[in-house]
Each structure stands twice: as structure tokens, then as C-alpha cells.
Image (spheres, rainbow, N blue to C red):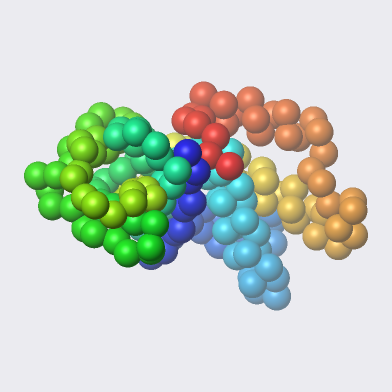
Amino acid sequence: MRLETRFSDIGDNPVTLNEAKAFLRVGNTTEDTMITAMVTSATEWCEKYLGRTLRDMTVEALFTDVGTQREFELPFGPVDSVDEVATVYGDGTETALTASQYEVLGLNTKYVNVPYIFTTKTLAGYKFTYTTLADCPSVIKEVIKKVIAELWSVRSVSVEGSNMQEPTMLSIYKLLDPYRVKTWF
């Protein structure tokens, strides 16, 4: 089975520009654009590592090569609502399913169960469109600030030398691990 995800309608980052600037001890507005980009990059990095969203957003998850699988875990939760479930056929066409043709299961992690759908077309996979609900504990906000500080400290270093230092990364991993859901990359 393969999974492709697309994100849209992305909400606010859990760390604001002002919070990041205060953490970095930057008092001017000269670097606001760069710091804003670092906040977004740090948030995205944490989301990928954690396997969960830290911002409200719309997620489109396309599962292909599904074989006979009929239950699918929705990545990058927590899921607020499932907006659409569609079958995707080999010819590229999609058919939206009605609410009676699938079932949303689970409390913290959401699964969608799609019973057998009779069709003469070749089934290529399923597409799920859903919205997430922002959930960012204060520990994760502090980690995002640490990642921003690392990005800030290497901002003028060449690409080859821009990797975060290992001791810092170990502390970041230790802080994030209790909140990690699943790796989806």
C-alpha cells in the first residue's frame, strides 16, 4: 500500500513570531520574514517527526495499491471531522461515498472502515479528505523554539554545515518522543 498526503487550509503556527523573537532575543523587525519561515519550518519538522498535526488544516490522504484492505488509519491527526471518502479507479475517476458506505472508528486515532463496494471498474485506492484539530502541548511549543534557535544559529552557515548539533537533537528527540504517534515519511 502507498500513501500520498496533501495539506491545505493550514492554520496558525503554534509558536507566534513574537514568541520566537522573544526566545531568540531579537528586538528589531529586520529579520521577521526569516524568523517566520523558521517558525513554519520548525513546526513542519516537528509534525513530521511526531506523525501528528500541530495546526488546524485540511488533509487529503490517498491510499493506493490497497489490495483487499478495507480499514485505513488516517495519518496526521488528531482528526476533527471526515469530510469526504472517495473510491479512486484505475482510469483516474473518483466516486464520493455516502456516509452509509463507510464508518469512522477510533477515539484518539481515527480509522475509516470501507466495506466492499461493488463496481465493475478497477479499484486503485481510496481518498480521504478530513480536517484536523490543532493540538500542541506546551512541551512541544518549547521544542519548536529550540529548533528555531538551532536554525537561527546556523543561518549564515553553508548548506553542508547547517545540520543541527547532535547533543541538541538528542534532547529534542527525548522531549518529543512521548508525544510521537507514528512515522508517516
Count of labels shown?
A: 0
| Residue under the point 67% across and 46% down | 147
Left or right placement of residue 20 versus residue 139 in this view: right
| Residue under the point 39% across and 37% down | 67
Query: In the current view of this chain or complex, which residue is farthest to the left?
Result: 100
* Image x and y of residue 115, in percent: 20, 36
Q: Is residue 121 visible?
A: yes
Q: Quadrant of the C terminus?
A: top right
Q: Nearer the viewer, residue 185 or 67?
A: 67
Q: Is residue 46 visible?
A: no
Q: Relative to 132, is 75 above or below?
A: above
Corner quadrant of residue 174: top right
Left or right placement of residue 15 versus residue 118 in this view: right
Query: In the current view of this chain or complex, which residue is farthest to the bottom?
Result: 30
* Image x and y of residue 182, in percent: 50, 31
| Residue under the point 61% across and 47% down | 45
Q: Nearer the viewer, residue 16 or 69?
A: 69
Left or right placement of residue 18 versus residue 152 in this view: left
Q: Relative to 172, is 136 above or below?
A: below
* Image x and y of residue 84, in percent: 24, 55
* Image x and y of residue 133, in percent: 32, 47
